[in-house]
Image (cartoon, coloured by chain):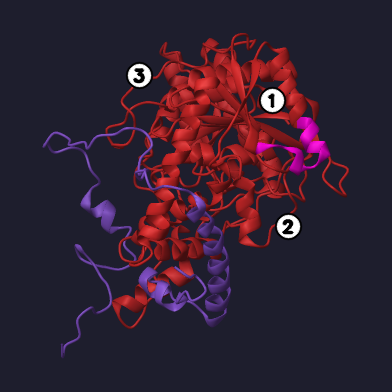
Chain colours: A red, B purple
Amino acid sequence: MSETMELSAAEIARRVNAGDISAREVTDAALAQIDAVDGRLGAYLTRLHDLARVSAGRVDARIKAGEHLPLAGVPVAVKDNMCLAGTRTTCGSKMLEGWVAPYTATAVARLLDAGAIPVGKANMDEFAMGSSCENSALGKTRNPYDLGRVPGGSSGGSAAAVAAYEAAIGMGSDTGGSIREPAAFCNLVGFKPTYGRVSRYGLIAFASSLDQIGPLARSVEDAALAYDVMAGKDPMDSTSVDRPVEPAATALRSDLRGVRVGIVKEFGTQRLGPEIDSLYRRAYLDLERLGATLVDVELPTAEYGLATYYLIAPAECSSNLARFDGVRYGLRVDGEDVGQMYERTRAEGFGPEVKRRILIGTYALSSGYYDAYYVKAQKARTKFGADFKRAFERCDLIASPAASSPAFAFHAKSDPYSMYMMDYYTIPMSLAGLPALSVPCGYVLPEGSSRPMPMGLQLAAPLFGEVQLLAAANAYECATQHARQQRPEGAL
Amino acid sequence: MSSDNIDIRYVAKLARIELTDDEVERFGRQLGDLLEHAKTLHELDTAAVSATAQVVESRNVARADAVGRCLEHETVMQMAPQRQGAFFRVPRIISEDS
């Protein structure tokens, strides 16, 4: 592997802006790494060699003309639910297998305008529904830390690509944990900003009141750099928030003095087994050593998170995915009349998990059950917001596990509910719209395995607390350096 | 509110998805299990709580009534699985004798 690919995004941008290396050279190194390892890893559904080289040429011309670009020459993996004009955008689904996006998502456009180079479209669970990438209808992605294990999901392709040095930044989307869980599984920083911070224009919708785009990176600084570029109001997304974005990358801290960190009583880690329990206890002590004050907080609604989420998200998805009907774009399977055409198209185009969620959502929204399920879940959601509001009166940040286990083996979670449990710690923050991230916090040895697998510490902040959140995560990362202690075998 | 008797074929009809017999059996069982879990929500007292649809305060937005940039008609039509000139082509919706 070229040394260039081990550089951080911040360092690549520094060198390209300084003229020490060209965007073209970085791009060639990224494409070479993809060609060398992606046959084994399967992080990408589409490799963008031609577009990447053209983009690099443009970036080099802009640098030569005197521009300074915050992400100059930084290779980026784009999750395949984000539109990039002229490229195949599949959502990991047979429904969109051959679909070429006619426009570019705002978040993607902002990264590219800042000098980033799109090197590929990354694999994902179909329509972002899943926690392992196993629900992709178009390919299998392996975890670079153990090829026999999943990379997490749904942004598993972006995570694997960044962990295996096939990109410096990954773009992910997070509805109930889809950035944070794969980041934890692949030893990365994965950051979901406050709902509405990043435009969803051009992100193929799953659950519109929860979906949020964010970065995956090998350091907090890189995640902050990408966030600073992609955040901000967009007239094309009326739910994007019109509020100034304070830069996070220049506000990173090296200590936690004066920061109160809440430990959620209901999130007790004892039930995760002694090894994982002691790993998180150590992580909390490290926060304390950095100057933070630990306080106990309560989230009485926490145990209802999965039930709430698995009504609201499917309800919204059943509505959003109604557009895939074989008429205007995507797959069509013919039938004798228009109704049969719809039903056959959707039967063939959607995989089992997508069908399952559409059916749950349709049921929860149907006449007679709407109040009992959907409205009830929306009321429970209000309680989550109130719980967090109370908790944040006593603390500035909340710390917890990002996932309840390290990456698991393929096919290990065969019943839907055990897969849904993976999101136990990330869902409450999603329901409340909070900014939250996962940062590497050490390794555990899965049963029967000799390969240590990474774990993630989740930190969450009040709404719009991105700067404080990233600043604190940086302090923890710099003091502990967990990610540097193991090399991903699949990248080498 | 019992989920034991979900008419999965009726739900699939509403969702416009054709299911195989095997899927009817499997999804029916899995949905039953999930809704059983969802029922734990009924332990939560929400009598005095209003529903949350959006977590971040937002207002309805109206843009200026001016022509903006949008996709070319032909760009959109080229994505159609079947077309006839400027129209999307679909199977017959109304039969001749109705």
User: Residue A92 shows which numbered tag?
Assistant: none
Instruction: Work out how far the residue at label 1 is from the one at label 2, CA to CA, in angstroms.
Output: 32 Å
Span colored in magenta: A267-279
Q: Which residue is mark 2?
A: A412
Q: Amino acid at mark 3?
A: Pro
Q: Which residue is mark 1?
A: A6
Percent position (x, y) of residue B58? Answer: 29, 34
Question: Which image quarter: residue A451?
Answer: top right
Residue pictured at 73% horizontal, 41% vertical: A144
- Which of A81/A381 is in front? A381
Residue pictured at 44% horizontal, 43% vertical: A381
Name the chain under label 3. A
Question: Which image quarter: residue A236?
Answer: top left
Can residue A470 be seen in the rendering of this structure? yes
Percent position (x, y) of residue A434? Answer: 48, 32
Q: Secondary structure at mark 2?
A: loop
Lower position in the chain sequence, tag 1 or tag 3: 1
Check the image and report above or below for A102 versus A70: below
